[in-house]
Image (spheres, helix red, strand yellow):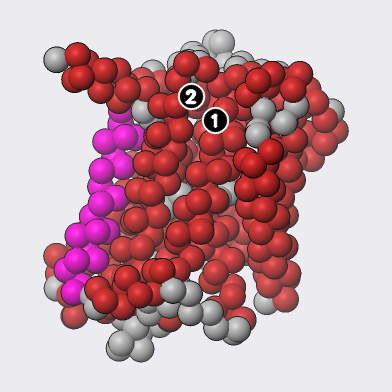
Amino acid sequence: MKTFKRLAVYLSLFGPGLITAMIDNDAGGITTCSVSGARYGYNLLWTIIPITISLIVVQEMVARLGIVTGKGLADLIRENYGIKNTFFLMVGLFIANLGTTVADFAGFAASMEILGISKYLIVPLGTAVIWLLISKGSYKFVEKVLLSACIIFFGYIIAGIMAKPDWHQVVHNTFIPHIKFESEYLMLVIAIIGTTITPWMQFYYQSSIIEKGLKTIHLNVTKMEIILGSIATNLISIFIIITCAAVLFPKGIRINEASEVSIALEPFAGEYAKIIFAVSLANASILGAIIVPLASAYYICEAMGWESGVDKTYSVAPQFIWIYSISIFVSALLVMIPGAPLVLLMVLSSFANGILLPFVLVYAISLVNNKTLMGEYTNSRGYNIIAWVTIGVLIVLSIGMVFSLYLQ
């Protein structure tokens, strides 16, 4: 009985880490993994293991920083690096997040249209529901909804199994790299990493940890959640790649959007595979459309010294509600406008994320090594080596992504 009670206590502390990790597989992430499998088969599976390690390292630092200081990342950057640096960082992040939210609403609209529902009906309805969820719901209720929705991500595993892949090739390519020095191949490697570790998730995760009220006694449980969440989200990525590698790659079917996978799957894997993939994409997209604007509201309010939090009412935190509302309503409107420059916004978003990620990560590791802030909870020498190597690789790849986008 004591074991079950202890397990219940541990599980009650879960939420921020799992949600943040799973939302990595939003419309952009799913598109990247789908294109990777369709164009290069199982060859890019090897990227998932180092990405998982990097995600664990970065998220653990951010979580520890939030738990020990009790402050959000934007708040700490403002206090330690000045208002001017924080202002320009926030403007860039808002633009990047707006483009990401547009991509999520576009993915939601496309997946629903595959299931026979018009985007002109479902996008306004979905927007209204998520606005009510955040503006009227409590943090605990919102967290339960998001955790429940995360279960639907495992539909990708079912779709992957239904695709009947070559499991020997899957294992071989997961553990043995097959690198091709082609621009498209290298761009996809960068994109897989870029959609897994993003600037917005560092701010959202730290803010949600604070709103949940986690303390230093919860560090070990938080680390466990980070490991489980990172493994789970990248397992989903593996199965998205597997599905497209098994079904689309042998047929030479090239895709550019995740929604195209659902249509392409039906002749080869059956109608159920098509429906599962479409429903899973819709779920991932709407979750991204909830979380990414929430990250914007958190970090802008923290940077400006305004009240923030899902538990706060409009009278207490009006700026928080306004920033969230503008983010989702503008994004939804752009998706419904015929001929709107959605591709330009998405490319701009990727460009901004590529530029901002190095700055965000350097700020985070500098703060977590500040003994005045962290006391005994600063990084050890060994952990710093791992963290700086991880951040160094991410910076190089982010710079590569920015240049590749610029040259397109």
Type of the residue with mark 2? Leu
Residue at x 58%, y 49% (from the top left corner):
198
Q: Which secondary structure is most common in the magenta stretch? A: helix
Which corner quadrant holds the N terminus? top left
In the rendered image of this protein, does residue 208 appear above or below residue 110?
above
In the rendered image of this protein, does residue 361 appear above or below residue 257?
above
Type of the residue with mark 1? Ala
Q: Is residue 368 visible?
A: yes
Q: Give whichever of 287, 165 is nearer the camera.
A: 165
**In the image, which residues are magenta?**
144-164
Q: Which residue is mark 1?
A: 63
Residue 306: x %, y % from top left: 66, 18
Residue at x 42%, y 41% (from the top left corner):
227
Residue 359: x %, y % from top left: 74, 45
Residue 252: within the magenta? Answer: no
In the rendered image of this protein, does residue 209 appear above or below residue 97?
above
Q: Give whichever of 187, 5 is nearer the camera.
A: 5
Within 10 Å of disc 1 (Cα), the crowding (few <14, some 14-19, many 20+) is many
Q: Is residue 28 visible?
A: no
Within 10 Å of disc 2 (Cα), the crowding (few <14, some 14-19, many 20+) is some
Secondary element at tag 1: helix
Q: Which residue is mark 2?
A: 219
Residue at x 34%, y 83% (from the top left corner):
249
Which label belongs to residue 152? Answer: none
Which corner quadrant holds the C terminus? bottom right
Q: Give whichever of 6, 91 is nearer the camera.
A: 6
Mark with earlier residue (1, 2): 1
Residue at x 53%, y 79% (from the top left corner):
179
